[in-house]
Image (cartoon, rainbow, N blue to C red):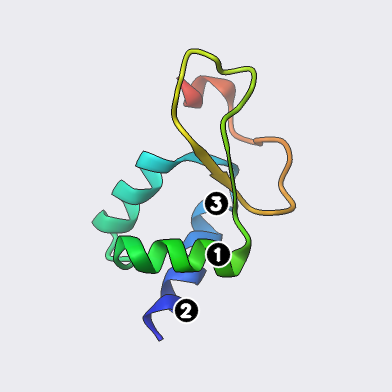
Amino acid sequence: MRHLHTERWLRQYLSNGWRPYPEIVAAAKAEGAGSLATLRRAKRELQVVSFRPPHMTWTRAWYWRLPHATENPRKKSDLI
């Protein structure tokens, strides 16, 4: 049942837009949202999309977003 908690947490965390993978892992750990394996299981269940933004060539970080989110509603200054 732990994965259901992690799914809810991940859905809420990504509801404000896409986030870099390292940030997601750190936040999940800090907030007790589950292990890395549970986080990946929740990602799979929610069909979260992993991608590298093409306009952000200066970063090698992977980002996660909810399956139906296309644009990031967060300010671009938050991404720097």
C-alpha distance separating marks 3 and 1: 14 Å
- Mark 1 — residue? 44
Residue 60 locus on image (x, y percent): 45, 24
> Which residue type does callout 3 highlight?
Leu
Q: Residue at x 71, y 47 (%)?
A: 69
* Mark 2 or mark 3, earlier in chain: 2
> Which residue type does callout 2 highlight?
Leu
Q: Nearer the viewer, mark 3 or mark 1?
A: 1
Specify the quadrant of the image occupied by residue 36: bottom left
Q: Nearer the viewer, mark 2 or mark 1?
A: 1
Q: Residue 4's mark?
A: 2
SS under mark 3: helix
C-alpha distance separating marks 2 and 3: 15 Å
Horizontal side of 33 relative to 80 (left or right) equals: left
- Mark 3 — residue? 14
Say if mark 2 contacts mark 3, CB within 8 Å: no
- Mark 2: give few (<14), some (14-19) or many (20+) Cα within 10 Å: some
- Mark 3: give few (<14), some (14-19) or many (20+) Cα within 10 Å: some
> Which residue type does callout 1 highlight?
Arg
SS under mark 2: helix
Q: Residue at x 47, y 79 (%)?
A: 4
Horizontal side of 36 relative to 44 (left or right) equals: left
Q: Residue at x 38, y 69 (%)?
A: 38
Q: Residue at x 35, y 65 (%)?
A: 37
Check the picture and name the quadrant holding the C terminus: top left
Residue 27 locus on image (x, y percent): 33, 50
* Mark 2 or mark 1, earlier in chain: 2
Residue 16 locus on image (x, y percent): 58, 46
SS under mark 1: helix
